[in-house]
Each structure stands twice: as structure tokens, then as C-alpha cells.
Amino acid sequence: MPQVHWKTNFCYVVRTLTMTSPYFMQSRPVITRSGDQNAASLRSKLTTRRRNQGPGSSVEVKVEPEEARISEQRPSSAPLSTAEARQPQPHLLTCSHVVCFLYVFLCWVRYSKSSLPCAHSGACHPKTETDALPLSSHSRRRKQLKVEYDEDEGVPPVKTEHWEPPDWKKQLGYIREMRSSRDAPVDNMGAEKCYDSDATAHVRRFQVLVSLMLSSQTKDQVTAAAMKRLRAHGCTAESILNTDDEALGKLIYPVGFWRTKVKYLKLTSAILQKEFGGDIPDSVQGLVRLTGVGPKMAHLAMDIAWDQVSGIGVDTHVHRISNRLGWLKKPTTSPEQTRKALEEWLPRELWSEINWLLVGFGQQVCLPVRPLCSVCLNQHSCPSAHKSSPTKRPKAASPCSPDPTSASTVKTEPGQESDVKHERLKKEPLPTPVSPNAPKRKIKTKVKY
């Protein structure tokens, strides 16, 4: 729909109002006293004008009788003079006036709603996106906007920085090489070797849990001997409940804290017999709920008994070696902190292997006190190497063992032994014998003043 300038519309309306309304016609005699004929001609002109203008026909019909009545009431005896005829009639307001004023008002409303403001020069500016927005009562107040960013479909998400030790793969390979013989105590007497392989599945799982409970603060040799006596007595939840505390203590002695472990075994066996029928829970949450079972035992039980890797079993060996090798982002003070720090970067497929690797490595090479760094393959990459480690002393029967009678040994041929012995006596003078009754000589010291 073409839009017309509002000034043009306004000029057209004013011109029409001036031409049609007798109120503004001052140069022509509009109404005369003898003018029934003139009044009729005026009515015909106004009717023609109103038909051309269109709107307001219902109002015009109501006003026309009033115009005729006013014109008929005027006396027609004497004609008006020219000066009187030229005077405007202020009270003569026809329907055309109302129509014109309504049209002007509509044009003004239309212009106020228009989104095309024009300059005084007549050139129109293009419609902008800001002008098209409706104005509200709160337009001056700044609104809080929620900024959202669209995700690019073709751009992959930015990966966060993944920390890992610099030489951990090389160090792990060396540990595997040093543990290739599998002759550490954990390899022959660990929890994997302490259960009865001929027992039923739920009894085997129960015996794995018992061996893990006894291994806390205890060497593997002592744990294996205690489990052997328990299996001979009957290592099931029912048999432990039927055994009194004194007899059970004799069976597991001398494991560390054996009196406390007797209570733990009784309470745990009662829960397992009542809720699981002598079996053990199949989740870490269910295992740590038992008395005397911690996170390390729970993860190892899930791995050995249920063949499910739920986490890394961290004991004192794994905790110590991980801190020594620098496998943690920052040093830790407890095995549980070490477990969480290792699980952040160590691949999950190594969680089951890392326990027995580091435990055996800690039992043989990386000892708690005086570790044997001189025979460790990681001595050049370990940040803790040779800080508190003496050289490994060879056995007394080995050819490298030193002679207790001499500080150094000289390799000689069979015929040269007497010559070497004679030469040694020349170089080393014999000490002079001192009798026990000889008085002691006082050493005089000179004092300089």
C-alpha cells in the first residue's frame, strides 16, 4: 500500500474544508433571505461533496433537516447586502466540518504510528530495527539480558588440561620388568591365594573378605598362616559365629590388633549371615558398611571376589611409592587421598594391575626404610632416589664381600703371595707393646701468652 506524505493529506483536507464550509467562505454569498432556490442549490452541492468524500453518511442524514429548518426560519422579505453576506456565520457548523476534522485526526494518528520518519528536506530514512520495536512504559529502564552462546556443531569441545606424571609410562615399564619374576610375598600369600579353591562361590568370597580384614597392619606371611588355621577350623560366616572369642583369637593370633579383629569378624559375620545368607555384598557401598572394612578392602574385594574393577586398592606400599615417584599432582597424607589422586589420571585398565605391582615392588626394592635405590631401574628418573638409600650390601658368601681382616684385597698369583705379604709388613710398622704397669706420661702443652 503506497504511503502518502502527511503534509499533502493535511493540505488537501484544509483546502476541502475551505471550499465546502460556509464558515470559511467570505467572498461569496452563501445564504440569502430569498434563497430557497439558493438553499436548494447549496444542499445539492453539499450532498455531492459528501458523496465524494464517503464516510459519515449516517451523521449527515440527521443533520440535513436541521439545515433546512434553519434556512426556512430566516425571513425572505429583504435581501442582505453585500457586506452582510460576506460576514462569516460562526454558528453554522455542518457535517462536512466534522468529517474533515475526523479525517485530520485520523491522519495525525496514522502519522504518529508510522515507522517512516522523514526529514525536512523530503528524503526518507530507511526503516531500522530499533524504530520497529514498540515502545513500552519501561523503555528507559535497562533490562537484564541472559547471554547464551550457541554451540558450534562442527567445532569439537575444548578439552581441559589433563595432568599426568612426565615419565610414568617408562617408570611403570621398569617396575613390570623388576616384578617379572613374581616372587614377592604378595604373589604367593596375598588375598588371591588365601581362599579355598574347592569351596562354593559364596564361601570363597567370604574367605577373601576375611583375609583382607586380617591383612591390615599385618605381613602377608602372618596373614596366610592365620587363614590356613581358619580354613582348617571352618572359615564360613556360620562357623565363626559358633566359635567363641577366645578360640577365634587363638586361631588368628599373631595378626596385628587381633583382639579388635575378633570383634570385627563376629559383627561382620552376623550381618552377612542375616542379610546375605553368608555371602558378601556386591558393591563398594555395601562393603564399607560392614564393620572393619575400609575403602581399600572394598575395592580389592570387588576385584578379587566379584571380578569387577571399582577402584584402586591403595595400601601403605602404594601410598608410599606413588609419593616417591611423583605420581601425584601434590603430595598426599593418607591412602584414600592417594587413591583419588591416582584415579584422576591413571587409565582405568591399569587399576587392577597397579596394586599387586606396587605392593610387590615395595616389599622387595622400594622398602619403607632404606630403599634399595642402587638396584632400582628408576633411580635416574625417580625424584626421591638416593636420598635415604645406602648401597646394597652383598651377601657374606659372595665374591664381592669385603675381607674383614683387611680394608682392601689384592688379587695375586699363587707364587706371589709371600712377596705381597713381606711388602705389606715393610710399609706398615709393627706397634710397640706397652706394659699395663707403665706410668702414663703427661703431655705438656706450651701456652703462649
Image (tube, rainbow, N blue to C red):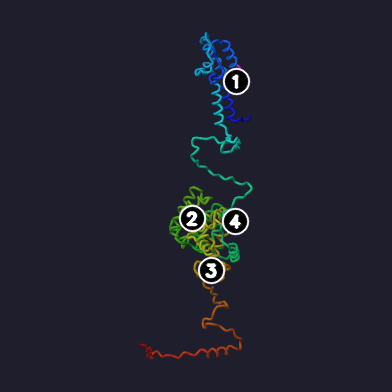
Give the number of the mark in front: 4 or 1. 1
Other-residue count near label 1 (Cα within 10 Å), few / some / many at <14 / 14–19 / ≥20 = few
3D distance between C-alphas at marks 4 and 3: 28 Å
Secondary element at image label 2: loop
Residue 412 percent location from the top left of the image: 60, 85
Residue 201 visible somewhere in the drawing: yes
Residues at marks 2 and 4 touching, judged by CB atoms closer than 8 Å:
no
According to the picture, the residue beneath numbered tag 1 turns out to be 54
Residue 98 sits inside the magenta stretch: no
Asked whether residue 225 is in view, the answer is: no
Q: Which residue is mark 4?
A: 349
Spatial CA span between label 2 and label 4:
23 Å
Residue count near mark 3 (Cα–Cα under 10 Å), binned few <14, some 14–19, many ≥20: some
Residue 209 vertical position relative to residue 108 in the rendered view, above or below: below
* Comparing labels 4 and 3, the label whose residue is closer to the camera: 3
- What amino acid type should be assigned to the residue bearing mark 2? Gly
